[in-house]
Image (cartoon, rainbow, N blue to C red):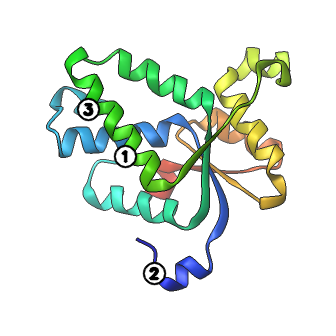
Amino acid sequence: MPSSFEKDHRRELLILDAGPIHELVLFHAVRHFRFQSLSSDLKFILSSESYDQCSKFIGLFKRKTTSASVVCEINYWIRKTETKGQLKLWELVYDEFRNMGMDEEVVRLLQMETNSVAKFGPVDVSLLEIAKRQSCLNPILLTIDRPLQREGQQAGLRVQLIQDLLL
């Protein structure tokens, strides 16, 4: 929970890729619901301290958003897990979205450059497009994906790797 100083000095917009959302949900699934079969999927948020650090960073932003494509990517991941745990994982995703005040934006395929989609995929391109659309807010894109970070930085966007945030 941000302090009153942090609330008054919040940054405007954070755009979240699937990786950080996946990590947050996985941490809860493993630590609080004992989904031990998913523990090997955790890569960056490995402790309560790293979860809190990530949550504090996210809390520094007035608005949080992602693309509808990211939700599809999360769906793909959940569908690959054991059927009886899928409802609980979706409940965790809903909880994370509610707790963050997450918004979703749609970027239509026909609004994306074909070369970019072929190189990076529609999910990454949609996130970059949201960042470009919202450039007046100087957004930060949070990801675990180094190629996405490089592409965003080459486009003049601010991209933060979760693994660097948690050092």
| Circle number at residue 13 | none
Q: Give the foreground label among 1 and 2.
A: 1
Taking the spot 31% from the left edge, 32% from the top edge, the residue there is 89
At numbered mark 1, what does the secondary structure look like: helix, strand or loop?
Answer: helix
Q: Give the foreground label among 2 and 3.
A: 3
Q: CA distance from mark 1 to mark 3?
A: 10 Å
Above or below residue 9? Residue 15 is above
Q: Nearer the viewer, residue 146 or 63?
A: 63
Q: Is residue 128 left or right of residue 10?
A: right
Q: Nearer the viewer, residue 100 or 46?
A: 100
Q: Is residue 46 left or right of residue 146?
A: left
Q: Is residue 29 left or right of residue 90?
A: left
The residue that mark 1 highlights is 95
Above or below residue 101? Residue 107 is above
Q: Earlier in the sequence, mark 1 or mark 3?
A: 3
Q: Earlier in the sequence, mark 2 or mark 3?
A: 2
The residue that mark 2 highlights is 3
Location of residue 38 (image quadrant) = top left
